[in-house]
Amino acid sequence: MPEDEAKAVRKLFERVGQTTGLEDQLRTFLVATPEERQQAIARLLAEHFPADPWQEVLLSVGLVDEEFNGFGHPPYVPVGTCFESRAALRASGLHDHLQAGIWGKADEDAKSIVVSGGYEDDRDYGDVIIYTGQGGQQKRRQVRDQELTLGNAALVNSQSSGTPVRVIRGYKGDKVYSPERGYRYDGLYRVEDHWSQRGQSGFLVWQYRLVAVDAAGVKEADIRAAHNAAKFGRPTLDEPLPTGLPTGNDAPGRRVTTTQRVVRSTAVANIVKRMYDYTCQVCGIRIETPTGAYSEAAHIRPLGRPHNGPDTPENVLCLCPNHHVAFDFGMLTIAPDGTVVEHGSQQRTYKLRLHPQHAIAAEHLAYHREHHEARRAAPVEG
């Protein structure tokens, strides 16, 4: 246990009045693992500060040296920690709202969500969550369409930037994955997709596909996303920006990194790209690089739950990076006659280029259009 942390723990024990047998308690901390120390401190904070901000206590005793900005793992709140109430979640820094399920605004990324069975269209698969956005309810019943504002827009921002979102499960959620009582912090999830659809009550709802960060194989360095989000605006998956210019490296090496957006490379994707000579089917751009042409394969009906699209040529398009992103976000749709509509402040149309040997499934294009049926280019308001 580092000496500075030992001094801070001593101050914490003194602040909560646990001075009897203090040296024995400190010796126990000395031999504990970092995970055990985190858990012990979290229990101490939960017992003595059930409604007071933990971050203020941690700052006052020196266990942290800067205020938590709300993104990523809060200091001294291990994954798996349980809480009795929403007030206790707020105190810990996990989730700031006593009722709203999404912590975030339209002009920033989302910090956390609570999965608590409040929306009939939610689906919880453990490492994958299909989460319904907020709004349009009265007495826990959907009575009107949801809008892409406030927390709903924040979750879209999180998908765009790749910033992980904290997931807290409540006791009213799916019995298989939810705690028996209270709330439990279940770690960081990545927003991998979002769409609008008619919910069970017949109204449009916004839905989000979240995948557990650990399940996606993301490294710890990638988890520390958005450390300076509040200070520098939209966060990224990089380390916090330095206060001065970096010195750099005169002889940089190479290493494999995990980025926000995964571009799959399969035999199916490669054959479709070769079929079009790596030329975008929408705009006709062929990007030349020193190692050859570059394009991306876009699945029309996404793979994985809840879409379960096939990894077959009739479900793949060859697109440039810009139009791949636009297609994934529903800002590019394809009509049954092959007309491509690019939505935005200035709507454009194209004619989809087709190779004689490439039969695109009409049902997958229809699924994509319906999947994004409520998306509009109107400005998002918070």
Image (spheres, rainbow, N blue to C red):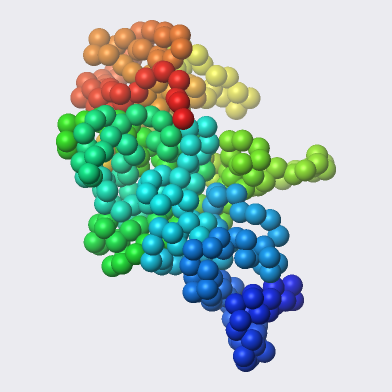
- At which x and y percent is residue 234? 58, 36
Number of numbered tags placed on the structure image = 0
Q: Is residue 77 left or right of residue 306?
A: right
Q: Quadrant of residue 357?
A: top left
- At which x and y percent is residue 93? 52, 56
The residue lying at 32 percent from left, 44 percent from top is 131
The residue lying at 33 percent from left, 48 percent from top is 129
Is residue 380 visible from the viewing direction of this image? yes
- At which x and y percent is residue 13? 63, 79
Q: Residue furthest left?
A: 201
Q: Quadrant of the N terminus?
A: bottom right
Q: Is residue 9 left or right of residue 49?
A: right
The residue lying at 44 percent from left, 59 percent from top is 87
The residue lying at 24 percent from left, 61 percent from top is 175
Q: Nearer the viewer, residue 285 or 84?
A: 84
Q: Nearer the viewer, residue 273 or 183?
A: 183
